[in-house]
Image (spheres, rainbow, N blue to C red):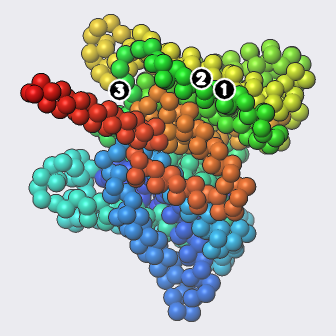
Amino acid sequence: MAFYVVQFLTGLASAASLFLVASGLSIIFGVTRIVNFAHGAFYMLGAYVAFTLTERFSGALGFWGGMVVAALVVAAVGVLVEMVLLRRIYHSPELFQLLATFGLTLMVEDLVVLIWGPNDLLGRRAPGLKGAVDFFGQNIPSYDLFLIVLGPVVLGILWLLFQRTRWGILVRAATQDRDMVAALGVNQKWLFTSVFAVGVFLAALGGALQIPRDAVNHAMDLRIIVDVFVVVVIGGLGSIIGAFVAAVLVSELNAFGILIFPKISIILVFLVMAAVLIVRPWGLFGKQEAAARRTPGLTVNPWRPLTSGERLAAMVALIVAAALPLVGGNYALTVGSEVAIFVIFAASLHFLMSVGGLASFGHAAYFGLGAYGVALLAKMAGLPMIVCLLLGPLLGCVGAAVFGFFAVQLSGVYFAMLTLAFAQIVWSIAFQWVAVTGGDNGILGVWPEKWVSSASHFYWLSLGVAALVVAALRVMVFSPFGFALRATRDSPLRSEAIGINGKRIQWTAFVIAGTAAGIAGALFAYLKGSVFPDNLGISLSVDALVMVLLGGVETVSGAVVGAIVYKALNIWLVSQTDLSKLVLGGFIVLIVVAFPKGIVGVLETIRNRRRSASSKSALVTSRIETAE
């Protein structure tokens, strides 16, 4: 019995740090509506800065002083980020905010390695709390008891801050109705800045408090951000009490899951998150009106045949791409194959986002399922490659059909988080089901057959499949189905009134997108000759979002251009510099701030302005000639 009590107390100690980080994210979202993917980066920075202050300036600041000062320093960095970057994108859709903060995360990861090095750092133990307390033969670290007390204390301070101060009243008012707060004369800019500073301070303090418990490393940000998203979604976006309750729930599930449900311990929290979202989409303590804004989508004209110039340009581009084996070596062809595969992957997500208005944060699940589908058929069933390529993506189709049925019942950020939960469930199954998937060792030896074993032949196969998939998706965009899907996106009530079954249409689009992603995963398995759980990971899903938004979500060809630019730039930077994430992150931030419509969107805007100027010039000339 004592062992289980100690395990429970260990879970409570972990909940304290998790609550600090999650409450900061919840506060920021509640007021600014920023889905801050960089929150984990601030948590990591808090740990690194606290390590430096407690090691090198312990005499001047002391251990606890170093902790607080570290959180203040990172909060000051957060204020600078908010003023320089986030103020420019407050009125942008959440997806663009996510993209900007993801770029910031990439930059911080490389900056941390550049300043502190790639090795793990072991911090000192907290003074006065180095020992342990004996509990019926089981030792409980004194520092864990300190964290158990700290969690409710911080909750109480935050409650007093938001309930008993004028600033807190303004923050709560802004959470309910930002426009009304602005109409009353409140300076929203500085209110948002102060809220962001408080949120970052809490995240950095949570990271600093982890020094006596864990090693400080440059992977802390991505490790914590997933758990934090789970906590704020379960608790309810914008709810501090919800964040506390959910942090305790998630931490205890992690503590006892390995003991009671060892086979599903990794996916337990995601199962709970999925169940909460299905039953109560806005979280346990959240409010229904806190839903995210609509995802931006296509606003293009109905179907029209390509003009002769557009048809010629498309043919020339395809011929130039097909001619790459004539001038490129095996490395260039391998890179070209990977780019073509990711064009399919990005186009599948773009179809779901632009026409359906459904932003999936877990699209990699169907990419990975397609990869595992061909790997299992090739290695276990011994089927020919062509059969595997035809049947393997069906696993992605089935996964999309099952998960999509539940996901399309939600919208906005809640839809995105449910897709993330499903993706993490699939990743966890692949990671733990060692007998079938090989676990972390993956499935090896998935090589293409002789007819496409050469780099040039596989490149032509990838390019041909990419062209077919993109063309098929484009046809569906302008088909009656595409217009019905767009009608459901733009006006659910009106579309329902004219007899369109919106949920069925969205589910069908989800299945189509998942199947296309499965095709990309199937080709990727043969390209790499192996499949690993990382093919289902959150980082790959974020990559797909970056490609779509980089090219332009409101354009038909944005995903193709975004995938080519992002993957080519990513691969080239990795080969050219050790700071590839820093450069790539800076490029992503620049695109979001300077070119929010994406690369193709900017080009189309320039072209439309030229057409408008040409039309005006022609009209003026015509009037002059008429007058003469």
Q: CA distance from mark 3 to mark 2?
A: 25 Å
Name the residue rendered at 15%, 27% in the picture: 625
Q: Could you tell me which residue is drawn at 71 percent across and 45 percent down?
A: 259
- Residue 442, by quadrant, is top right
Q: Whole-percent x and y of residue 219?
A: 65, 59
Q: Quadrant of residue 413?
A: top left
Q: Report if residue 533 is visible in the image.
A: no
Q: Which residue is mark 3?
A: 299
Type of amino acid under label 3:
Thr
Crowding at mark 2 (Cα within 10 Å: few <14, some 14-19, many 20+): few
Query: Residue farthest to the top?
Result: 499
Along the viewing direction, whichever of 96 and 244 lies nearer the viewer: 96
Q: Amino acid at mark 2?
A: Met
* Callout 2 secondary element: helix
The residue that label 2 is drawn on is 315
Residue displayed at 35% across by 51% down: 89
Image coords of residue 71 (percent x, y): 47, 73
Q: Quadrant of the C terminus?
A: top left
Q: CA distance from mark 1 to mark 2?
A: 6 Å
Instruction: Return the residue nearer the eye: 476 or 170.
Output: 476
Asked if residue 571 can be seen in this view, the reply is yes
Foreground of the two, 564 or 528:
564
Kind of residue at disc 1: Ile
Residue 76 lies, with reference to residue 305, above or below; the image says below
Q: Which residue is identified by label 1?
A: 319
Q: So how many labels did they put on this image? A: 3
Nearest to the eye among marks 3 and 1: give it. Answer: 1
Between discs 3 and 2, the one toward the N terminus: 3
Give the image location of residue 244, x and y in percent. Answer: 44, 54
- Label 1: few (<14), some (14–19) or many (≥20) C-alpha neighbours in 10 Å: few
Label pair 1/2, CB-CB below 8 angstroms: yes
